[in-house]
Image: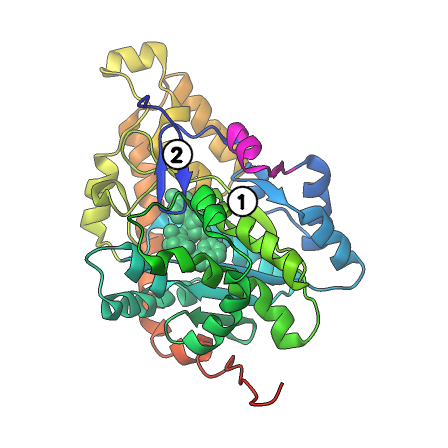
């Protein structure tokens, strides 16, 4: 296996990611200019992540917007596998989902797959997974989602509803499909083999709860795509609309290459990190700089491979002219890595300070968001 071989699954992202190739491999479509215009028409403005191609691919988004234009509102569905603290990469799809919720007045179903993380992580107990659900929910609330339009589903806490709907999905997914799509082997536990049917459920919940077919849009990074292939197949068989997707790229880690991943904590900024820790991580970040200052002044740096620049690009420098200017200053050797790191630090630290305050306040709001007693689908004795 070559070092650079690209692997993108829900549990593993390795190698240099070629997003064009991923579109081909996964059978999705690039976000066209025409589609972006259509989003802009309805949303009023294009989110920074759309303007910059952070969200780059989709399935059936054109269909979903046609439905919207014909008066059929859509629901949003996204989620988190609560394996530990939330990092800044996770916020990419969530911040974008908030923009969609606000712009399209859409209801959000947010799934916490505590079951998935329990099943897939050897050292995780079910209690730990539930604790992470609670902790990660604070991050979601801190981003300002509207509790009246947001339902957070913990799979373990909402097991009755989730399981009974998942059964319908599971019946239509063969083991050979699951193996081909997710790479399960004889060593995979049987819980995780069943799990994709649980991750399919929130795509159908809006339709089940409203008693009619409701279009559903899933914003997430492209690593989650295997789930949607199975879900879309089952949707067709069960008489639901196929859920549409909009896919983002991966915010990189602060190391050399690779996505931001909690499994390499020193290259990963967590939302609960203390300011000194954040400073240390950013100061040690991999950049596109040269070996010496002299060389960098003469030859310029490479912002395209620089993790610090990517952070500004994906999330922290909202002004398009500014980000272009920073790119240029780096390439022409007019700005050195130390200055650029400081610019990022001056943005990340205040953001996290504010976010951490909001996380504290979120503790009083948890029950407003939890779906626990709101989606208790009862099963009648008689059919
Ligand atoms: P999880 O916890 O691995 O990731 C949560 C969300 O964050 C995205 N993501 C990233 N986005 C940008 N840059 C990164 N470096 C980065 N790392 C992770 C993921 O794509 C995801 O959107 N099984 C899921 C939980 C889930 C879910 C869903 C996610 C259940 N239903 C519906 C999205 C949509 C999981 O473990 O996500």
184 up-or-down from 150: above or below: above
Determine the residue located farthest toward the right in the rendered image: 70
Q: At numbered mark 2, what does the secondary structure look like: helix, strand or loop?
A: strand
> Within 10 Å of the Cα at label 2, are there few (<14), some (14-19), or many (20+) other Cα atoms?
some
Q: Which residue is mark 1?
A: 247
Asked whether mark 2 and ligand 1 are closer than 8 Å, the reply comes as no
Report if the CB atoms under discs 2 and 1 are less than 8 Å apart.
no
For marks 2 and 1, give the CA distance: 16 Å
At x 56% / y 34%, what residue is drawn? 23
Q: Nearer the viewer, residue 61 or 328?
A: 61
Q: Is residue 33 magenta?
A: no
**Mark carried by residue 235:** none
Q: At numbered mark 1, what does the secondary structure look like: helix, strand or loop?
A: strand
Tell me where the magenta segment starts and ends, as one range. Answer: 20-31
Quadrant housing residue 382: bottom right
The C terminus, quarter of image: bottom right
Closer to the eye: label 2 or 1:
2
Q: Position of residue 129 (x, y in %)?
A: 28, 65
**Mark carried by residue 7:** 2
Q: Is residue 27 magenta?
A: yes
Relative horizontal placement of residue 374, taking residue 119 as reference (left or right): right
Q: Nearer the viewer, residue 49 or 280?
A: 49
Does the rendering let one see residue 145? no
């Amino acid at each position: 296996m070559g070092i650079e071989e690209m692997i993108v699954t829900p549990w593993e992202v390795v190698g240099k990611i070629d997003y064009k190739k991923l579109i081909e491999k996964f059978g999705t479509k690039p976000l066209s200019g025409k589609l972006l215009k259509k989003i802009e028409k309805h949303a009023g403005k294009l989110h920074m992540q759309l303007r910059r191609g952070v969200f780059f691919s989709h399935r059936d988004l054109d269909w979903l917007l046609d439905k919207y234009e014909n008066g059929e509102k859509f629901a949003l569905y996204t989620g988190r596998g609560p394996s530990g603290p939330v990092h800044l990469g996770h916020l990419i799809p969530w911040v974008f989902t908030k923009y969609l919720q606000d712009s399209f007045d859409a209801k959000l179903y947010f799934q916490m797959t505590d079951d998935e993380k329990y099943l897939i992580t050897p050292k995780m107990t079910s209690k730990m997974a539930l604790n992470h659900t609670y902790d990660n929910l604070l991050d979601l609330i801190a981003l300002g989602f509207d509790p009246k339009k947001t339902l957070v589903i913990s799979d373990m806490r909402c097991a009755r509803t989730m399981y009974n709907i998942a059964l319908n999905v599971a019946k239509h997914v063969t083991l050979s499909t699951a193996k081909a799509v997710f790479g399960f082997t004889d060593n995979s536990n049987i819980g995780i083999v069943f799990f994709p049917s649980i991750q399919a459920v929130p795509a159908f919940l809006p339709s089940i709860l409203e008693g009619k077919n409701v279009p559903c849009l899933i914003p997430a990074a492209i690593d989650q795509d295997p789930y949607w292939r199975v879900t879309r197949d089952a949707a067709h068989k069960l008489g639901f609309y196929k859920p549409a997707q909009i896919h983002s790229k991966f915010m990189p880690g602060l190391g050399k290459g690779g996505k931001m991943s909690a499994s390499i904590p020193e290259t990963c900024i967590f939302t609960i990190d203390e300011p000194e820790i954040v400073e240390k991580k950013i100061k040690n970040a991999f950049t596109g700089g040269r070996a010496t200052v002299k060389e960098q002044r003469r030859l310029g740096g490479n912002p395209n491979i620089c993790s610090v620049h990517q952070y500004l690009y994906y999330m922290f420098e909202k002004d398009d002219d500014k980000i272009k200017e920073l790119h240029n200053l780096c390439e022409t050797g007019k700005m050195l890595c130390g200055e650029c790191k400081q610019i990022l630090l001056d943005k990340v630290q205040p953001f996290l300070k504010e976010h951490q305050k909001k996380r504290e306040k979120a503790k009083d709001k948890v029950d407003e968001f939890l779906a626990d007693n709101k989606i208790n689908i009862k099963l009648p004795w008689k059919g």
